[in-house]
């Protein structure tokens, strides 16, 4: 028997938290989540009932993946967002707190919305959180990544939202991408908006999909292409909600104004610019 096999769950978690201290700001939490995953139990069950068990064989390998900066969400294959457990893989951006303002604003503004479009749906997080809050609405999620769309469709089915959602492969950098989509009361978008040279945590830069993050030197490339197309996707009285980087409000507002869209800025609880709400001017 190896030394590690003799450790209890509690001891193995402590050792893992030390191992991860230099690579993660949340080392103890990471260790607990990975151990719960290795044991196939919830984290609260782990802490209440399993600390004295002997540590499972597979745990050390999970800890080493995390020590190599792989995000916990990819290792365990899921991430909670708005109380929904979502499957995630390295084909999709991990749903983040950054997007909460967008979902909350969509639920507030979208009371009467029947048709919702999510541009760059990834795991489906934004669309599914909005549909869960708007029981009358149906949604379409588009993405250029077929692997991402498979993740999103799986999440929709698992959450009982498959009947109200469809997922289509579209790339807004290619001509004709809007063909056949129609008009929407609510358009959501969390496009790539990170500057190529941004200082990013290695768990993000080395593991999350570059195509979902980076948008040129200023992070504005996708807004420049996508925002001018929004008027053609909005039904009369419709609203688009676009997630932005904290320093991008003025630049994206200018792009929107050039496309005939009025904008209203929403900030997160930390006061950072997070979402622009866009409507056709004069509506
Ligand atoms: N909010 C993400 C981050 O800063 C970026 C998301 C995006 O580019 N759409 O990590």
Image: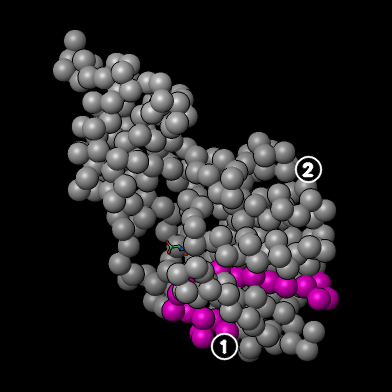
| Residue at image coords 74%, 82% | 280
Q: Position of residue 173 (x, y in %)?
A: 58, 69
Name, please, the residue furthest toward the front. 48
Q: Residue at x 33, y 23 (%)?
A: 51
Q: Which residues are magenta?
A: 235-253
Residue identified by numbered label 1: 254
Q: Nearer the viewer, residue 169 or 44?
A: 44
Q: Which mark is residue 163?
A: 2
In the picture provided, is 280 more to the left or to the right than 24?
Answer: right
Q: Residues within 10 Å of mark 1 (few under 14, many from 20)?
A: some
246 magenta-colored: yes
Distance from label 1 to label 2 (Cα)?
38 Å
Residue 20 x/y as whole percent: 24, 42
Pointers 1 and 2 in contact (C-beta within 8 Å): no
Q: In which image quadrant can residue 87 be found? A: top right
**Which quadrant, please, contains the N terminus?**
top left
């Amino acid at each position: 028997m190896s030394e590690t096999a003799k450790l209890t769950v509690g001891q193995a978690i402590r050792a893992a938290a030390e191992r991860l201290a230099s690579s993660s700001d949340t080392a103890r939490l990471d260790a607990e989540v990975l151990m719960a995953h290795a044991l196939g139990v919830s984290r609260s069950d782990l802490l209440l009932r399993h600390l004295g068990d002997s540590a499972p064989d597979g745990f050390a390998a999970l800890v080493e993946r995390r020590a190599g900066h792989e995000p916990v969400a990819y290792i365990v294959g899921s991430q909670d967002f708005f109380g929904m457990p979502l499957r995630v893989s390295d084909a999709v951006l991990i749903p983040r707190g950054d997007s909460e303002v967008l979902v909350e604003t969509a639920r507030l503004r979208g009371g009467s919305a029947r048709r919702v479009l999510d541009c760059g749906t990834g795991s489906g997080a934004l669309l599914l959180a909005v549909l869960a809050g708007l029981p009358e609405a149906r949604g379409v999620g588009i993405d250029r990544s077929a692997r991402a769309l498979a993740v999103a469709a799986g999440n929709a089915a698992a959450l009982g939202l498959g009947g109200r959602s469809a997922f289509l492969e579209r790339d807004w950098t290619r001509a004709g991408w809007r063909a056949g989509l129609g008009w929407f009361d609510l358009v959501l978008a969390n496009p790539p908006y990170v500057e190529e040279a941004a200082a990013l945590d290695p768990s993000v830069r080395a593991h999350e999909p570059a195509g979902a993050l980076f948008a040129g030197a200023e992070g504005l490339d996708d807004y420049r292409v996508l925002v001018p197309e929004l008027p053609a996707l909005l039904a009369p009285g419709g609203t688009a909600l676009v997630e932005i980087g904290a320093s991008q409000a003025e630049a994206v507002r200018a792009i929107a104004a050039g496309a005939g869209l009025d904008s209203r800025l929403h900030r997160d609880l930390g006061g950072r610019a997070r979402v622009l709400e866009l409507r056709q001017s004069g509506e």
